[in-house]
Amino acid sequence: MGNALRWLCGQCCKPSTTGDSESLGHHGVSAATVGVSALAQDLFHFEITSQVPEGLSNHVASSKRAQANWYRKILEAWRAEQPPPRTPEEAARLVIETLKTNQKADVEGLLAFYGLPLPHTLVQLTAGPPTSLPAGVQYEFQTLPVDARAIADGDGLTVYVSTTDPRESSCVPSDVQVAAVQRSQARAEKNYTTADAIHDAIINSGYRVLKFPNSEEILARKYRIRLKGIDAPENAMPYGPDAKEELTKIVQGKCLRVLVYGEDQWGRCISDLYCNGKFVQELMLKKGLAWHYAFYDQRPELATWEREARAKGIGLWASSNPEKPWEWKKNNPRLLCGQCIEDTTTGDYELLGHHGVSAATVGLSALAHDLFNFEITSQVHEGLSNHVVSSKRAQANWYRKLLEAWRAAQPPPKTPEEAARLVIETLKTHQKADVEGLLSFYGLLLPHTLVQLTAERPTSLPPGVQYEFQTLPVDAKAIADGDGLTVYVSTTEPRESSCVPREVQIAAIERSQERAKKNFSKAKAIHKTIIDSGYRVLNFQNNEEILARKYRIRLRGVDAPENSMPYGKEAKEELTNILQGNCLRVLVYGEDQYGRYVSDLYCNGKFVQELMLKKGFVWHYVAYDKRPEFATWEKEARANRVGLWASSNPEKPWKWRKNNRRGIDAPESSMPYGKEAKEELIKIVQGKCLRVLIYGEDLYGRCVGDLYCNGKYVQELMLKKGFAWHYAAYDQRPELATWEKEARAKRVSLWALSNPEKPWEWRKDKREGR
């Protein structure tokens, strides 16, 4: 067990997107620094091709010729800088200094394109990290990289500390250690339901297993942090979202040094934070996004930094009379109840930047960035030695070869697949472990995961296609499972622009006006009405917004394992890897009975269904699609025993769904007794803690379960009161039939009708338009 735990706890890499701590890769690039890598990649490619990025003209007024001149100057300055810029602040200062004779609007447009700090946001820091512990500090620790979703507001966040940390290793409860090993074993056996249940127990103990690339994992302890000496506006206050966003930019993807002074009444660690040697409280005060909390901390430097921001009128000090957060909290105690948990499903659409780099392609940018810097400094990335066995000298030789190959490629690699193929081909004479280590370091595809595609993007619409559209970039949170997702289409698209309801257009304008007035509560309420109409205002970097229409998509001709089935999570993860951050071409054949658009998807010219079939993460859904190429691609995956075909007898998703629907069926809300059934269920469960026994998921991703409320079986209550039918097609338990008979005999509720309509027949009639 000891050896297993050392393996489990001793890895150090980036967390995944599954709700654990998140960064973008071993290569050190985070969402906060991806603009630096994007700029370095574009400078590198400009040197090879003399081409500037396509999208830059949308952000600057000058011509392509002028833009090429800027890139030439920045390229010279970047090469002269020793060492080259590594942080957004360093890159921004280099751009500002190099282009200081150019138009201000062009310089700011270029910075905004790469998500780099604008001139007025750059601050000069004076406080360095302490060399000894200040008075009052009880202890300190180093965190794992911080996940953006762990930022609660402008002065609070959740961090995780590896249990290999000397301070933590000696106090991990034995039951947590055992549970971590058992979870690892359950996942190895593909028993994900058991693994998730064990992980819940670990989480309840204040720990979490953080998942990193290539299935590496770390057992970590959770700490809730409150920044000492400052008070940021609450999220519902003016400048609250700005403060949270600024703290996110500072700490996202970074390992922090935390100096703990004690705990507050809510169990949070009152702390000073240092990020890359910078004092986080100083940054927040100088940028005008926090008050000095003088009642609890009288350090004079905090007061000085607040005065500097007031004098400049930046951040919240741009307002003539900003409200103090402690007074606002006193007057709005109810609004604080929802602040303690981070909402990761706000629906605001998050991209990594205008520069075209997404979470799926950030490894490609990181590799280009490192090759460019290697050409200047002859230094390889420090962290690479943790992933390969060869020496630094050998690594330098690889970089030299890759640099030559990258320059020779016309055009240079633009996708992770192209970059992976270039690496594999260039280093084909080297050890397999080294090549795979290099690929995994940059999050690129390993050799056995690369597939040869045969289907070409259609030049005309295939038979049966009703229409097509182009989506906005896909958010990872919009992937429901291995064959379903939600996409958004801009209302500026010709097909959409003519049919946006007038009330939605007006609401979008009103929301924008309220946000400009910093009236975020009202803006959020207006946005909810937009969402209820099937639209959404998507937030992009630099506060750009797009009104977009929502479409729920079902991939045509394939059926992936449900999320709670073996290989269900892997199928969802694979679809996420393919689509995340990319714009899709969608060919729509029609709607299914659940209102989803049955479609073929193309991503960067690749047919998504072909990718999923060849990688063995979906079945050919032959009952609904007889295309012979689908059967061929499935046969290839079966023969290669990849994905779910590694199992000797994988269960068909459609059979699994049929066997995992259970219990009762209540009238729909618009049917007789539908509203009464809903009211009865509310009366039973409202305000109560429930015990839920999960049997699986249905095709909508809902957990199919038995409910117990205060020891009472909810299905029994609903059946006996005549507010639900026994759903015998999916659950043959005799007691359910008995309870329905009792209600029929008493003629209560829906059974008072002489001939009540069955909900499943009513739904079928609605689908068929009868």
Image (cartoon, grey):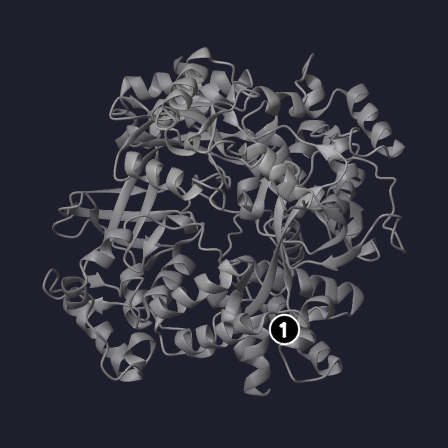
Q: Quadrant of residue 615?
A: top right
**Residue on which the image places disc 1:** 74
Q: Quadrant of the N terminus?
A: top left
Residue 377's place in the image compared with 158, above or below, is below
Residue 444 seen anywhere in this rendered image of the structure? yes
Residue at 31%, 50% (x, y): give it: 157
Q: Quadrant of the C terminus?
A: top right
Residue 124's place in the image compared with 383, above or below, is below
Element under label 1?
Answer: helix
Tell which of 717 and 187 is nearer to you: 717
Q: Amino acid at mark 1?
A: Ile
Residue at 68%, 21% (x, y): give it: 652
Q: Which residue extends farthest front?
A: 754
Residue 445's place in the image compared with 309, above or below, is above
Residue 340 % position (x, y): 27, 49
Q: Quadrant of residue 628?
A: top right
Residue at 73%, 62% (x, y): give it: 45
Residue at 31%, 81% (x, y): give it: 318
Tell which of 227 and 435 is nearer to you: 227
Tell which of 256 and 761 is nearer to you: 761
